[in-house]
Amino acid sequence: MDKCPEDGFLLPEQTKDFISRSLRGQQVEVNDQEINVIETPQVDEPITVQILTLGGSVCQVKTNKKHSIITLKEEIEKYMDIPVGKQSLFFRNTELENYNNGMSRRVGDFGIQDNDKIYLSILMKEIDVGDNINAVKVRLQWNWVNSRDFLDGIVYVLDGNNNITARLDYDNNVSPLCGESIFHKGDDIDNDRKLGCQIIGMNLENIPMSVQTIVFTLSSYRASSLSSFKNPRVHIEEETRGQPLAGCDTDAIKSQAIIVCAFRRSQQGWRIIQINRESSGNAQNDSALITSIIDVVRNL
């Protein structure tokens, strides 16, 4: 990467190549001495945006249309204690990417105005095709306090239009769509530790390409809410080697159910996204839970 001698901007090789190819076929050799870098004008305008997590938290963050997306993420980290590297931001269903063709993206590039809403996904883990991770085990866990009680781990499979195409639980452990690429293994109960767990196994390579999102939930079986259970949580590991991939705890829950996390297909492979969104509904009547899931997935 060279520096433009007049303006002092770093000039990537791909930028020089692009300019050369854009001269409508003229046989001109472009070099550093002949280039003046022209940037899109950015309005110096302070704005305040609302940052909404998938779990329902809201935070107001001050920024500027001239600020880079990375700078905005740094401000969010100050307010919400979420590391920059774990943030994925979405505005009107468009991801706010840090760079485009090697150039830093700015807040003003996306048409963001004062008081606009930006949705924040918390990235737990990215699994790339080249990572050689296929067999994955998802452990949805909880502890009971007094008498033994159960939670239901329910899995919802959605296509690219956010339609639910499969549902797996302890009774329906496989689906015609996914076969054994996603399968519910049932309960794993440790009475001595008062520990309950439902396990879901996945073979990522075999999941049909029509599947865009896989959502994992916990809901009460008998109790009116999850508040009588300690620390509902998820642990995700690579099954063959037992390698931990991701995990998160949930906050105190007063609702019947919680949408814990999701696997979301990406160009590189899969993203594991933390959600922690409370909801009504359980295995016996999950219509309200389905409504909450679709609302969340629209903003992934």
Image (spheres, rainbow, N blue to C red):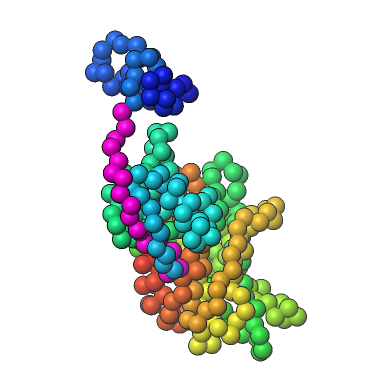
Residue 264 in the image: x percent, y percent?
A: 46, 55
Residue 193 in the image: x percent, y percent?
A: 73, 78
Residue 290 drawn above or below residue 126: below
Q: Is residue 283 left or right of residue 149?
A: left
Residue 148 in the image: x percent, y percent?
A: 65, 86
Give the image quarter of residue 41: top left
Please give the count of numbered marks on the rendered protein: 0
Residue drawn 41% across the image and 21% down it = 4
Residue 3 in the image: x percent, y percent?
A: 44, 22
Would residue 54 be counted in the magenta stretch?
A: yes
Region rendered in magenta: 38-56
Residue 233 drawn above or below residue 36: below
- Nearer to us in this view, 176 or 126: 126
Residue drawn 56% across the image and 71% down it = 250
Residue drawn 31% across the image and 20% down it = 21
Asked whether residue 249 is in view, the answer is yes
Would residue 144 be counted in the magenta stretch?
A: no
Residue 154 drawn above or below residue 89: below
Farthest residue, direction right:
192
Residue 208 drawn above or below residue 41: below
Residue drawn 39% across the image and 63% down it = 60
Q: Is residue 89 left or right of residue 150?
A: left
